[in-house]
Image: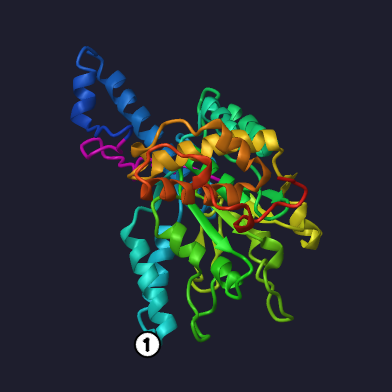
């Protein structure tokens, strides 16, 4: 859970001539007390006032000791909900000290990450929630993901209430056939939220180590990709995309999806320990999106931790809208984009309505290249790849 940290006054001093504890960033001395009470002629009143300040400081000191005794990440006071403590500085210092004797490659890798982590602030700032209008605009470009966007908008509406708070929502599963835009949507959602996207292809053999790391005693061991990207980055709440999560390779010795059981529970994510680093890190602010082609292959225990969305291929009408938005995005993102007309001709958008979003973008990029070769700044039907070169989506006819 995202939690802020706060400071309390230091040691109270009973001697009225010494410096009293600091409070609210202001140093208060006995002389300052005298100045603030200069209108009081009664010495006993002045003494009582000074003693009251000292008692208050002692009470704060007791509270400070109580908070310091709490486990990392369990602070009960959160003056700033947008601050999160990623790592406990004392635990980090102990880990660095313990890694000094390492001479193998794995141990040196761990020490390097720990030292880099010590150079970064333990406190990180979370991103502001996206506006509801920005999410509404996102729906125009991804009409077949409208149910997912509406789900995020509900959580964003809560986060935008006064006082404003970070946007958090349970892990999301986007289930559907290949090529319908699940990855492109995830990237666009992260951009709308103003955070980076960390993409992990879970069908690769190293998928498990990317999530949970590997004991440095093993060959190639060390902190995982997730730890390196989040802990050594300055954004503690990215969107992490697990592509084709149901295809993660498994064997009898290791479940590569095992770390998700901790990472997807706020109570344990705030003290997640990478097997290659062995130090608790606060990953509770990460926003998770998983894509699947067949979610039935996932373990029910994982499914129960997620919000499930069955996404389908867009209709021909929706694909026309997607084509116009994809063309606008290509022009906006490419350095050469402004060389072409602002609006995609409608006949080209209609022609692309029989394909998938993935092939649609590929066809548009090829068409723009064809127009450039022919010295034109406006696309024509002849610029599109020939029909036999396009992959037709199941269920659509040209």
Q: Position of residue 156 (x, y in %)?
A: 58, 31
Q: Position of residue 315 (x, y in %)?
A: 71, 38
Magenta span has 20?
A: yes
Question: Vertically, is 331 above or below 296?
Answer: above
Relative to 363, 31 lies left or right: left
Q: Position of residue 152 (x, y in %)?
A: 62, 36
Quadrant occupied by the C terminus: top right
For image coordinates 26% across by 15% down, the residue present is 42
For image coordinates 61% across by 46% down, the residue present is 357
For image coordinates 75% across by 52% down, the residue present is 394
Q: Secondary structure at mark 1?
A: loop
Relative to 35, 246 lies left or right: right
**Classed neighbour count for the residue bearing mark 1: other residues with Cα under 10 Å, few (<14), some (14–19), many (≥20):** few
For image coordinates 55% across by 24% down, the residue present is 161
Depth check: 218 or 49 in front?
218
Residue range in magenta is 1-22
- Label 1 belongs to which residue? 103
């Amino acid at each position: 859970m995202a939690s802020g940290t706060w400071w309390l006054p230091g040691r109270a001093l009973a001697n009225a001539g010494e410096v009293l504890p600091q409070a609210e960033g202001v140093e208060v001395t006995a002389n300052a007390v005298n100045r603030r009470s200069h209108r009081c002629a009664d010495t006993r009143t002045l003494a009582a006032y000074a003693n009251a300040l000292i008692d208050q400081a002692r009470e704060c000191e007791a509270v400070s000791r109580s908070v310091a005794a709490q486990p990392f990440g369990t602070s009960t006071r959160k003056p700033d909900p947008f601050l999160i403590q990623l790592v406990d500085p004392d635990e980090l210092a102990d880990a660095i000290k313990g890694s000094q004797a390492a001479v193998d490659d794995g141990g040196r890798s761990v020490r390097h990450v720990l030292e880099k982590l010590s150079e970064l602030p333990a406190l990180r700032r979370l991103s502001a929630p996206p506006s509801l209008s920005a999410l509404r605009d996102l729906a125009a470009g991804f009409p077949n993901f409208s149910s997912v966007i509406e789900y995020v908008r509900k959580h964003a509406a809560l986060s935008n209430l006064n006082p404003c708070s970070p946007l958090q929502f349970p892990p999301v599963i986007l289930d559907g056939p290949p090529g319908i835009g699940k990855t492109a949507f995830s990237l666009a959602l992260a951009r709308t939220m103003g955070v980076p996207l960390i993409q992990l292809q879970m069908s690769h053999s190293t998928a498990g180590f990317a999530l949970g790391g590997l004991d440095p005693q093993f060959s190639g061991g060390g902190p995982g990709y997730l730890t390196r990207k989040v802990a050594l980055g300055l954004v503690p709440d990215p969107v992490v995309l697990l592509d084709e999560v149901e295809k993660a390779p498994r064997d009898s010795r290791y479940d590569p999806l095992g770390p998700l059981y901790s990472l997807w529970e706020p109570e344990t994510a705030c003290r997640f320990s990478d097997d290659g680093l062995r130090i608790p890190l606060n990953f509770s602010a990460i926003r998770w999106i998983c894509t699947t082609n067949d979610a039935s292959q996932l373990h029910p225990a994982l499914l129960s931790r997620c919000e499930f969305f069955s996404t389908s291929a867009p209709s021909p009408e929706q694909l026309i809208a997607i084509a116009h938005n994809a063309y606008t995005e290509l022009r906006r993102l490419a350095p050469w984009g402004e060389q072409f007309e602002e609006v995609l001709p409608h006949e080209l958008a209609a022609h692309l309505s029989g394909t998938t979003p993935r092939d649609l973008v590929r066809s548009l990029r090829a068409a723009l290249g064809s127009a450039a070769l022919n010295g034109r700044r406006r696309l024509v039907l002849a610029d599109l790849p020939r029909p036999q070169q396009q992959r037709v989506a199941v269920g659509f006819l040209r």
